[in-house]
Image: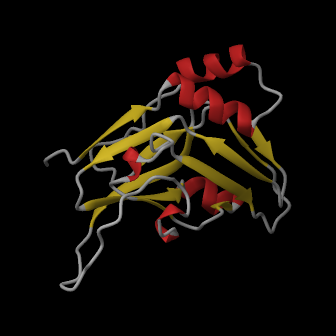
Amino acid sequence: MEPIARFEKVSPARFLADWQKTFPTASEAEARQVYEHLQLPSRATAGSAGYDFHAPLTFTLQPGEQILIPTGIRVLMRSDYVLMLFPRSGLGFRYRLQLNNTVGVIDSDYSQADNEGHIFCKLTNDSRDGKSVTVEAGSGLIQGIFVPYGRAENDQADGVRHGGFGSTDQKG
């Protein structure tokens, strides 16, 4: 199978800015330590379709609580692919840990965005059984699957991405 993408960390400056904006009580030293321990997404087995994104911190969510997590990761991929992000199966099945946007869509040009294509995930513990969920740093958090896509015959897209979330709706 031919590789179609490459994961890499965002720059230290980008990560530090995003981490401290998301977690304002975190010191720069704490954010740097998190950055140094970031793991690139990986597949668990040769037959796995999903690339596990690893939690950069340990956290616990009570039912109804949510967390926004800067992963520190970006992806460079062929222009005819999209990376789709899903909850890890076990976390979703056991705890109803959900991505707030249900499925994350990372477009091939996102890596050129002003934020270096920094992938974030926002998760909610949607437990209906009153279960809290703890995710340990370094364990699988979400999973990403590369999917090829086509274009319509009458496609007229010629815009250039600048921002991240919601930027493709902006006309400029």
| On screen, residue 19 above or below 91 | above
Residue drawn at the location 78% of the way across and 25% of the way down: 26
Residue drawn at the location 37% of the way across and 43% of the way down: 75
Q: Is residue 13 left or right of residue 161?
A: right
Task: Report x, y in % for residue 161.
Answer: 41, 56
Report which quarter residue 105 is drawn in: bottom left
| On screen, residue 8 above or below 134 | above
Asked whether 125 or 123 is in front, the reply is 123
View extreme (left): residue: 2
Asked whether 25 or 100 is in front, the reply is 25
Task: Report x, y in % for residue 133.
Answer: 75, 48
| On screen, residue 69 above or below 38 | below
Report which quarter residue 126 is drawn in: bottom right
View extreme (front): residue: 172
Q: Is residue 83 left or right of residue 57?
A: left
Report which quarter residue 160 is drawn in: bottom left
Asked whether 35 or 14 is in front, the reply is 14
View extreme (bottom): residue: 154
Color theme of the render: secondary structure
Q: In the rendered image, is residue 104 in sight?
A: yes
Task: Report x, y in % for residue 8.
Answer: 38, 32
Q: In the rendered image, is residue 57 in sight?
A: no
Residue drawn at the location 61% of the way across and 32% of the way down: 56
Residue drawn at the location 47% of the way across and 65% of the way down: 172
